[in-house]
Amino acid sequence: MLTTTGRTTYPKPSDPVEEVPPLWRLGLLGLQHVLAFYAGAVVMPLLVAQGIGLPPDEVARLVNSSLLACGVATLLQAVGLPGIGIRLPVVQGMSTAAVPSLVSVGLAAGGATAGLPTIFGAVIAAGLALFLVAPVFSRLVRFFPPLVTGTIVAVVGITLMTVAARQVGGGDPSSTTFGTLGHLGLAGVTLVVILLLTKVARGFVATLAVLLGLAAGTAVAAAAGKTDFSGIGEAGWFGMTAPFHYGAPRFDLLAVLAVVLVMVIIAVESIGQFFAIGEITGREVKGPDITRALRADGAATVLGGLLNSFPTTVYSQNIGLLQLTRVKSRWIVAGSGVIMLVLGLVPKVGAVVSAMPAPVLGGATIVLFSTIAVVGVHILGQADLTDSRNTILVATSLGIGFLPTAFPQFAEHMPTRQLQALFESGIMLGTLTAVVLNLFFHHLGRRRPDPVVPTPPADAGPVRAPASPAAPPTEDPAGSEQATAGTARR
C-alpha cells in the first residue's frame, strides 16, 4: 500500500496473544493447559486437608472448591476487568508455598473442620492486603532487570525438576514400587510420544504434543492395569460447595500476619514469572502490568477464601507449555479457565482426569519444567555475565535455591513456622537471594561520580574552581547496566 509520503506500508502482523482460534481448537488447547496444571492444583488442597486432619468427604469438597477458584483466577488474569488482570496467557493454580502456614493456622485454631474458618479468614484478609498494595510492587519492577528475572525463572525450573522426578517414580518415594521399571516405562512412553510429535508433526497436531503424549501414556497404563478408574463411578455428576460452607470466616491477627507474609513471598516469586510470560509472548511487562496482575492475584485469593479455597499463583508448568507449543493466545488460557470451572462443578469429570497415573504426568513434566529453566537461561542472555558480580549473583541464587530441594530437613531447624515455610521452598529462597544480592551489588552504596575538570594546556595559567558544581551525568535506570554487554563497572 502506497502512502501520500511515497512510502510503502504493510499491515501489521496479528498479535498472537490476541488470536482467537476456532472453538474446537480453543477447547483442545485449553484442555492441554488444564491437564498440565491439574495434578498440582489438586495436590495443594490435599496437603492442607491431610495436615489439619480432614475426613475424605471434606477433602473432595476442598478439591472441587479449589478448581472453581483456579478457573475464576485464570479468567481474571487472561480476560481481566478494568484495572485487574495482566491480559496475558497466565494460568493460575493453588500455591503450595502457602501449605505450611495454612496447616499451622488450622491446627492452632483446633484442627479439622474447626480450623477452616480461621484459615479462610486469613486467606481473605491476605488477598485483600495484596490487592491494596499491588501498586507498591509495581514500583519494584526496576529492581528486576534481566539478571534477576532470568535467575528467578531458572531457579523455578531447576527446583521443579524434583517434582517431575517424583512423578516419574510413581509419586510416593516411600513406596516399595517407587522408581520401578514399570513406572519408568509409563513416563518413557509419554515422553517419547511428545518428542516424536515435536519432531514429525506439523501445524495443529504439533501444538497438541503434550496432550497426545498424556493420552498415549494413560492408554498404555490402562492396558497394563496401572490405572484406577473406580473413582469415576463413585463421583457425582454435579456438585458445588456453598460459600462459607464451614461457617463465617474468623479473622485472627496472628493467622492473618502469617498468611500475609506468605502472600508477599508469592508476589515476589510471581513477578519473575510474569516477566517470563512476557518474554515468551513478546510483550514487554511494565509496572502497570504488574499492578494489574497482582490485583488479580489478590482478588482471586479473596474469592478463594469466600469459596472455601486457598491462595492462587502463576503455574510454572503452563509457562513451560507456552514455550513448548508456541501457542500464545490468552483466549486459549481463558478457555482453560472455563474448563476448570466445569471440573469444579462436575466431580465425575474431575475423577476422569485424576485417574491419570503419576508416572504419565511425570513424562510430560520432565519437558515442561525443564523448559522453564531454558527460558530463564534465555533471559539471562540479556544480562552482562562478564561482570563478576553478576556471575556471583546467579551462582549464589541457584545454589541457595537448590538447598531445600536437595535436603528439605533444613526447614526443620528454623525457629518459627514462617521461616520453616521459607526454607521449605527452593523457589522462595532463590528468588529472595537474587533480589537481595541485586540490591547489594547494584543499588546500595552507589554514588555519583565526581565532576571531571579538564586538564588545561601547560600555558593556560592556573585553573579556577567553578562557581557551582557541574551537573552530574544522567545515570542509566537502575539495573540497566546489567542488561548491556560490556558496561563498565562503576
Image (tube, helix red, strand yellow):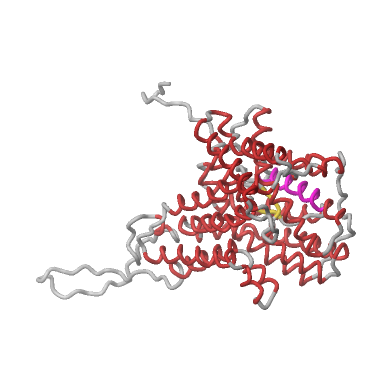
**Residue 248 position within the rendered picture, expressed as x and y whole percent measured from the top left:** 88, 60
Residue 52 x, y percent position in the rendering: 81, 65
Q: In this view, does 385 lie to the left or right of 408?
A: left
In this view of the protein, can residue 83 be seen by the observer?
no
Which stretch is magenta? 62-77
> Is 151 situated above or below 70?
below
Residue at 58% across, 30% down: 205
Exactly how many numbered labels are in the figure?
0
188 up-or-down from 142: above or below = above
Magenta stretch, main secondary structure, is helix
**Which residue is rendered at x = 49% and y = 30% of the image?**
13
Q: Which is nearer the eye, 359 or 384?
A: 359
Residue that appears at 66% across and 60% down: 133
Of the 4 image quadrants, the one containing the C terminus is bottom left
Quadrant of the image occupied by residue 422? bottom right
**Is residue 145 in sight in this rendering?**
yes
Residue 62, position as x, y percentages in the image: 81, 53
Q: Residue furthest toward the bottom?
A: 415
For this rendering, which residue is in front, 410 or 417? 410
Q: Position of residue 262 (x, y in %)?
A: 68, 64
Q: Quadrant of the N terminus?
A: top left
**Front-lying residue, 289 or 188:** 188
Q: In the current view of this chain or complex, which residue is farthest to the left?
A: 459
Q: Quadrant of residue 191?
A: top right
- Judge from the rendering whether residue 171 lies leftward or rightward of residue 367; answer left or right: right
Q: Where is residue 350, by image quadrant?
A: top right
* The magenta stretch spans residue 68: yes
Residue drawn at (32%, 67%) of the image: 470
